[in-house]
């Protein structure tokens, strides 16, 4: 919602300020048609890789805190929002609880996730399907996504 690129940039700045994490890589920003609820403005999507000392559940809490800090209100599933931060992978771990599933359960269905992920981690192997990201990405039409910018990340000391 609102300033879509600005929201992505702000979220990256906030994530990069987490004392126990740092951003390692980022993809380009892509505009894509909305997913789920289609009667809304196109989405802006990007993928970042972070190094963190947080557990998966603590990482999820930090993601929710950041979304809340940016004014996200959860009202309609897949509906309009200021920002949506998902955990796609946590290394090669498989993590399943009622509140968190890693790898993200729908990652291989979403070109707006796989194509930017392929930019930063093409050789990463999906821990469930045992398929490299670049092979998953080959099944998508990259022309459905439109590059609209990039995320500039200020360097941060090692954690």
Image (tube, grey):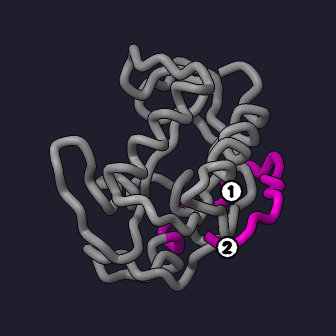
Residue shown at the point (17%, 50%) measured from the top left: 97
Tell whether 127 sits left or right of 7.
left
How far apart are labels 2 and 1 at the CA level? 36 Å
User: Which numbered disc covers residue 143?
Assistant: 1
Residue shown at the point (40%, 41%) measured from the top left: 61
SS under mark 2: loop
Instruction: Please tell me whether residue 119 is drawn above or below residue 39 in the rendered image.
Output: below
What quarter of the picture does the N terminus occupy?
top right
Residue shown at the point (60%, 50%) measured from the top left: 18
**Count of labels in the image:** 2
Q: Rate crowding at label 2 as few (under 14), some (14 to 19) or many (20 or more) other CA atoms within 10 Å.
A: few
SS under mark 1: helix
Q: Look at the image and give the residue range highlighted in magenta.
A: 137-159
The residue indicated by pointer 2 is: 158
Image coordinates for residue 27, horizontal then vertical, percent: 70, 61
Image coordinates for residue 108, horizontal then vertical, percent: 39, 61
Q: Nearer the viewer, residue 131 or 48?
A: 48
- Quadrant of res 24: bottom right
Image coordinates for residue 112, horizontal then vertical, percent: 56, 51
Q: Nearer the viewer, residue 127 or 98?
A: 98
Q: Rate crowding at label 1 as few (under 14), some (14 to 19) or many (20 or more) other CA atoms within 10 Å.
A: few
């Amino acid at each position: 919602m609102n300033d879509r690129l600005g929201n992505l940039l702000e979220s990256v700045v906030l994530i990069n300020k987490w004392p126990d994490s740092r951003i390692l890589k980022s993809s380009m920003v892509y505009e894509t048609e909305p997913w789920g609820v289609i009667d809304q403005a196109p989405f802006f999507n990007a993928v970042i890789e972070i190094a963190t000392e947080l557990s998966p559940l603590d990482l999820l809490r930090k993601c929710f805190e950041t979304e809340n800090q940016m004014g996200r209100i959860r009202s309609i599933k897949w509906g309009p929002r200021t920002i949506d931060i998902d955990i796609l992978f946590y290394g090669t771990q498989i993590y399943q609880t009622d509140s968190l599933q890693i790898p993200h359960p729908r990652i291989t269905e979403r070109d707006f996730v796989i194509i930017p992920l392929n930019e930063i981690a093409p050789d990463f192997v999906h821990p469930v399907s045992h398929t490299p990201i670049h092979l998953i990405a080959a099944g998508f039409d990259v022309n459905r996504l439109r590059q609209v910018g990039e995320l500039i990340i200020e360097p941060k000391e090692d954690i």
